[in-house]
Amino acid sequence: MPEKPLTELEELIGESRITVDGLVVERGKVREFVTAVRDENPVYRDADVAAEQGLDEVPAPPTFTQVARHPRYQPADFDDDGIQGFDLGFDEARTVHGEQEYEFERPALVGETLTGTTTLTDVSQREGSDGTMTFAVLTTEYRNDDGELLVTERKTAIET
Amino acid sequence: MNNEQTERLRASDVAVGDEGPTLVVENVDRVDFVKYAGASGDFNPLHVIEPYAKKADNPSVFGQGMLTAGYAAQMLTDWFGVGNLDRFKTRFTAKLWPGDTVTVTGEVVDTDESDGNMHVDTEFAARNQDDETLVTGDATAVLPTE
């Protein structure tokens, strides 16, 4: 069970905060990320290949916003002890990543700068075979400097 | 992966039951976990520090779930093109261990053309060499019909 009771966590549902600030989609960072996931697709390395696919620049790969966990992309008041900036009182050693979902308006492109706003969208508890499981759903919307929504990310964390 | 295929994929080429490209990631190793930690900024010691992982009752370090999700995303973008991927969801079901070979496959389960574009619903899975499922998921791609 988390340190915080369910009623206290439920009161946090709907709360939003900026959790990603100044996430520049850099050419080199895209290359570093796709290399780490062994993705050799030239669209992530060559703007001409991207252009052939109708993209104005090299795109970020679908899971690129994972790089937001670097401190350089976090606002100064970011709560590093929590999950995506939310201290829910989950025990880190017993917390697993249950699901991850992405919705794309279009791919983020090299040269764009993203801001991420995270909302705690759900908290619930269920009895499992090993006791109470607590579920938290955190939804992050990534927008560029024009305020255009590019990616919505939904992460489900489970404390077992 | 044959990237030419993704550029040419059109709505008329897609039907329920079609299988996507098979993506094989051979012999995933500790260095892959270290590279992903460095690239993503997820420095959870369970993935990179062997004594810490063992103390938490694991036989060794294991891979970040999002690394496996990254392999799954690669299969989807090889299949449909990165600009055509509308959404995808992964559920994490088993851990990725050093030495694993991961195979990602997918299948078209539904299509819908009602709004003038072809919405292609797929289900996919990433499995290890023992046919254990690491990740399951579903995704939708939107393809132009012209």
Image: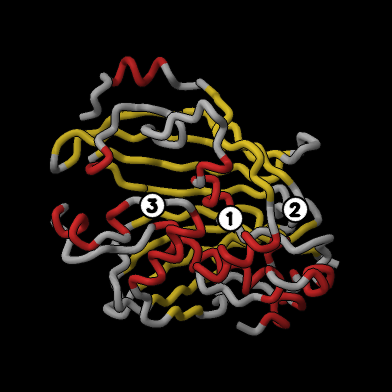
Q: Are marks 2 and 1 on the same chain?
A: no
Identify the disc placed on residue B114.
Answer: 2
Q: Name the amino acid, label 1.
A: Phe
Residue annotated with mark 1: A64
Q: Are marks 2 and 1 in contact (CB under 8 Å)?
A: no
Pointer 3 chain: B
- Quarter of the N terminus of chain A within the rendering: top left
Camera-side residue of B143 and B113: B143
Task: Check the image and report above or below for B30 versus A30.
Answer: below
| Label 1: element kind | helix
Q: Name the amino acid, label 2.
A: Ser
Query: Disc 2 and disc 1: Cα gap in Å?
Result: 31 Å
Task: Check the image and report above or below for A81 versus A52.
Answer: above
- Residue B99 sits in which quadrant? bottom left
Pointer 1 chain: A
Q: Position of residue B2 (x, y in %)?
A: 65, 84
